[in-house]
Amino acid sequence: MATTTAVPDRVNTVPDTATAVRAPVPYWVYPLAAAGAIFVLLPLAGMAARVNWQEFPQLVTSEASLAALGLSLRTATASTALCIVLGIPMALVLARSSFPGQQVLRSLVLLPLVLPPVVGGLALLYTFGRRGLLGSTFEAFGLQIAFSTTAVVLAQTFVALPFLVLSLEGALRTAGTRYEAAAATLGARPSRVLRTVTLPLVLPGLLSGAVLSFARCLGEFGATLTFAGSLQGVTRTLPLEIYLQRETDADAAVALSLVLVVVAVVVVTLVHSRAGWAPALGVR
Amino acid sequence: MGPGPGCPVSLELTARLPSRGFEADFSVADGETVAVLGPNGAGKSTLLGLISGLLRPAWGRAQLDGNVLFSAGQRPPDRWVPAHARGVGLLAQEPLLFPHLSVKANVAYGPRSRGASRAAADQTARHWLAELDATELAGRRPAELSGGQGQRVAVARALAAEPALLLLDEPMSALDITAAPALRRLLRRVLAGRKAVIVTHEPLDALLLAHRVVVVDGGRIVEQGPVREVFARPRSSFAAGMTGLNLVTGTATETGLTDADGVHWSGDAEAGLRPGDLAAAAFRPASVALFTDLPAGSPRNAVAATVTELVPHGGLVTVRAGWLAAEVTPAAVSDLSLAPGDRVHFVVKAAEVSIYPR
């Protein structure tokens, strides 16, 4: 700390700084890490260099582009909401209870993380499709799910749900159960404990999980194409539009890609600044 | 052995947890505060967990004010009342105030959980914050409180929930030595006439807060009885080691207490103690220093006594002279070349002596 009172010169000439020394990292790690970073960032630069800036506004505001962007935002929002409604109870069951087969269930629930999305789309098709496991039941009620906007939401939820569950389960385990026990001994019923103690304490984890899920929904391609098809304004989300435009109008594809990159950067920044949310909530 | 005669028993618990080697019969009478002493891992936390509903035994039964808390492996059917429906409050070592709520909202949490209106809960919170001298903290966040303030608010929160029985799990252990006596005084005031169980490492807590002491060791209750009896004549080795407090009884004066032999002891008197009241003074053997020649200076109490025995234990030596005990280092013993029969001065600072009403 600097001092303003008169002190002997000798003291002032000594730099009063100290750097904490961490366990050293081997030197050969740095060039490899740099290569990895370049590998991730270079393609983005390559794409940005290919953007036709003169026509950029027209390209991203064409009827097809706006329809795709609007559909993407609407479906991703609906899917994220569905992820929250289903994901919070799943994370609670995984983190706060124990039953036989819990480990197996956890692995199965996280399956969409590692499954190729096309396979997920096929699985959904053979479940909710016209001749699927449940499709005929829905059909009887006059509901057709496959190749509708509902199918887009289901496909996105299917692939994004594990992100929310994983993130929230981790937050729940970190938060521990001490505050919940304190609330119970004050007479709070389990639902009240969940609403007034558990969820506020894991809010940062829940928010970052929701943001990750939203991002995953926005980028969903394989499962959507397989299960929902590519109908402009109905099921053709931004990634599908980009893939389609790539064949006919590369400039439009690149421009729309840039829009997705910007959205992704915003999302990642939000998630990484979540460390900044915690002190505001008083959570350590 | 149960609580004192004439007291209706209001908590009765019998439980066995073979996996933890725990087996105990435990009871608390109406308006009685029971101190549970014992080494780490003795089963004190298990006992509190069983009463509060955070631990479920395979065999046992407990009843509070005529309501069954749990019944397992007894006459069927088994019964289990969850923690939130027991009316048992729990104050832990740390305050565990909800970090996202203000101090007042924390204290109002119990009444709100029991269905009180916002206004009524608010009023209850204000009342208990005032009782605990914490009114000025109402608008703060828990992160802005010191350890002592946090624990005071936690006490207010626990009492605002109007528990039929309050459990305190070493409530002073996480506080620094300056904050602990203040909280102890507050607890003494708010626990009066209330059913409570206090788990503690500190003999002073038992002495100042409890009517009865239960000593737990190895998952069993090894000794119990009125506080002064157990402290004066400890039967278990643990109680003897732990409760070896120096106790003096007499009459209160302006600055301390005069004992039956006419010796005056200066000390830290509890508020409300008037000269002439019956009083007791307590100080720990570790607070006592030994001198062959009487030192001058600071307000100290000094008594000359003849050493009766030297008992080494855990790297220290307990020097006894009749009822007086001092705990000193082996170096101090050899410096004074102490041996039984020597005459030395037992000296203790006034600040280390607690004086409280009998």
Image (tube, rainbow, N blue to C red):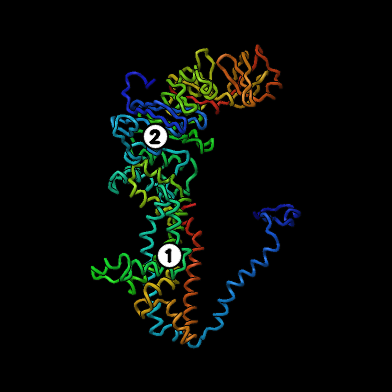
Q: Position of residue B82 (x, y in %)?
A: 34, 40
Q: Secondary structure at mark 2?
A: loop
Location of the N terminus of chain A by quadrant is bottom right
Q: Which amino acid, by three-letter code, is at mark 1?
A: Ala
- The quarter holding residue B55 reads top left
Among the 4 quarters of the image, the one containing residue B51 = top left
Query: CA separation, marks 1 and 2?
Result: 41 Å
Q: Amino acid at mark 2?
A: Pro
Q: Is residue A167 above or below residue B213?
A: below
Position above or below: A108 against B190: below
Residue B352 lies, in percent from the top left, at: 55, 27
* Badge number at residue A160: 1
Q: Which residue is mark 2?
A: B57
- Tag count in the figure? 2
Mark 1 surroundings within 10 Å by alpha-carbon count, few (fewer than 14), some (14 through 19), many (20 or more):
many
Q: At x 39% / y 26%, what residue is drawn?
A: B26
Element type at marker 1?
helix
Q: Mark 1 belongs to which subunit? A: A
Identify which residue, B334 or B185, lies in the foreground: B334
- Name of the residue lying farthest toward the left: A141
Return the residue nearer the eye: A123 or A67: A123
Q: Is residue B80 visible?
A: yes
On the image, the x and y values in percent for residue B185 come to: 45, 32
- Seen in the image, is A94 located left or right of residue A187? right
Q: Is residue B260 left or right of residue B61?
A: right
Image mark for residue B40: none
Query: In this orientation, does residue A215 appear?
Result: no
